Amino acid sequence: MTQYVGCEQARGLLDGLVDGELSMADQLAVESHLRWCRTCALRVDDMRLIGTSLRIGAPAHQPDGNRDQAVAAINDAVLMRVRAELDQSFAVRVREMFADRRLLWPALGATAAVLLFVGVASSVLHASSAEQPRSLAAMIATLSHPGSERNPLRPAENGVSIPRIPPLDDGGAMEFEEALPDEDEVYLVRTVVSRDGRVTNYELLLSGPEGGTPARTRELAVQEKAVLDVIRQTRFTPAQTPLGHAVAVDMVWMIAKTTAVVLPTMNVDVSVMQERPKDVPKPAVQDPAAAPERSSTTRRLKYRPSATA
Amino acid sequence: MKNAGVISWSEVDTREAALIQRCTTGDEVACADLVAEHQRMVYALGLHLLGDRDEALDLSQEVFLRVFRTLASFRGQSALRTWIYRIVINQARNRQRWWRRRHRSSQVSLDEHLQQCGDVESKGTALPDRLLASKETASRIWQALDRLPFDQRTALILREIDGLRYEEIAFSLGVAVGTVKSRLTRARQALRAELLGLRT
């Protein structure tokens, strides 16, 4: 029994019917539909008329006296070019490989994508292969070079000398004198002094007094910054091993400024106070109201910074 | 999606396989045989796609050169004829983009062609629909065909003039069979509209 198909379904099969591409069942169903549906039958007639018009109106099917000769000449021309192509240079062959422009942009896009991928991959590989500071290899490399900036020694151990600031007369400590505030203050700084005497790293362990008011806090911050600037610029005589090799050292040094009040009745030997050991406790701060007034007889004694391990 | 049919080497004609084998070894006689066997088909398709005799002749040479360059990579994924069709279509598509921009004005219409070359060929046994396909109808249909997009026009030409099956058209165009069906339907709809306009 033939399957029933409506117009809507039949229209989707009409092209297949005209082209002979339907299955037997579909063909029987559509032909059965065409027996009673005039609209679809006319549609099929139009399709067949279009096909017939195309075939009989095809330019290649028109009589042309010169065409046969021209087509026959294709063979000779092609063979001649095939022979000539064998003698062509490599560059010409490559150029003709890209004659098919349909693939040009996809090929360029793919090439750009590959280059981008290679770039990203190589940068990732480079980043991952770079030595990390916390890696075991980096630690071993650091430990294998004692006395370097990354592995500084401790002064006064194993005969390593203590880095010194040039004497006051040479101007080495004069900058501190200018940078330090008028009040008494103590700064404790941990620094790494390199083999050439420069401060490569520092950490402020103890600074001056804390400010009470915002204005005072800002003032102290400016002073602290001035002191740190001087610390950064300080040049030491490098520490040396007993064999005379310059080494980097990690040390803590104290910068202290203390004002001693010399009363008229006291007899102070100033020369004794030129060097002040670091463990000498700072004089207790007295009540400003109870402290004696600074008179013209008050002398300020500035101490050179002293280093300690 | 149903892909275009693929046939194996075993399904390729034995004589054709031998011809291909000889061509790949550089046998000039085999190359000449291959060209002679397909040159008319290549020229006709080129002429129908481009609409210009000289362009079609030039295209034919380019197609056969490309055939010989790439014949070593032919693995019998289709009949040789279908494979050559594919090359013709690709070459024509490239050429048409360039050529239409520059020589559109010099394209010869079918009317002029018929005036120069005479009326349509008549056969001894005329079918009823062929009687209906007058010179004017054919001319209008071909003009409408020329206005269709390249892919629709190619699908219709391969089907109606060259008589290729859907699978062969799909392989030649490098698309799925369903795409071929839809292109044929749209192309016929456009031409039918032209036909209806001709009747009114």
Image (cartoon, coloured by chain):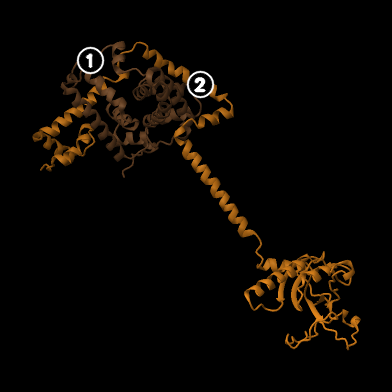
Chain colours: A orange, B brown
Residue A90 in the figure: left or right of residue B100? right
Q: Is residue A224 above or below residue A298?
A: above
Residue B158 in the figure: left or right of residue A224? left
Q: Position of residue B174 (x, y in %)?
A: 37, 37
- Mark 1 sits on what residue? B122
Q: Residues within 10 Å of mark 1 (few under 14, many from 20)?
A: few
Q: Quadrant of the C terminus of chain A?
A: bottom right
Q: Nearer the viewer, residue A190 or B161?
A: A190
Disc 2 and disc 1: Cα gap in Å? 38 Å
Q: Is residue A233 above or below residue A92?
A: below
Q: Is residue A152 above or below residue A274?
A: above
Disc 1 marks a residue whose amino acid type is Ser
- Mark 2 sits on what residue? A81
Q: Residue A13's mark? A: none
Q: Verify CB contact (< 8 Å) between mark 2 and mark 1.
A: no
Q: Nearer the viewer, residue B55 or B64?
A: B55
Q: Quadrant of residue B137?
A: top left
Q: Position of residue A121 (x, y in %)?
A: 57, 53
Disc 1, SS? loop
Is residue B22 visible in this depiction of the protein?
no
Q: Residue at x 31, y 11 (%)?
A: B116
Disc 2 marks a residue whose amino acid type is Arg
Q: Residue at x 74, y 74 (%)?
A: A190
Residue A201 in the figure: left or right of residue A57? right
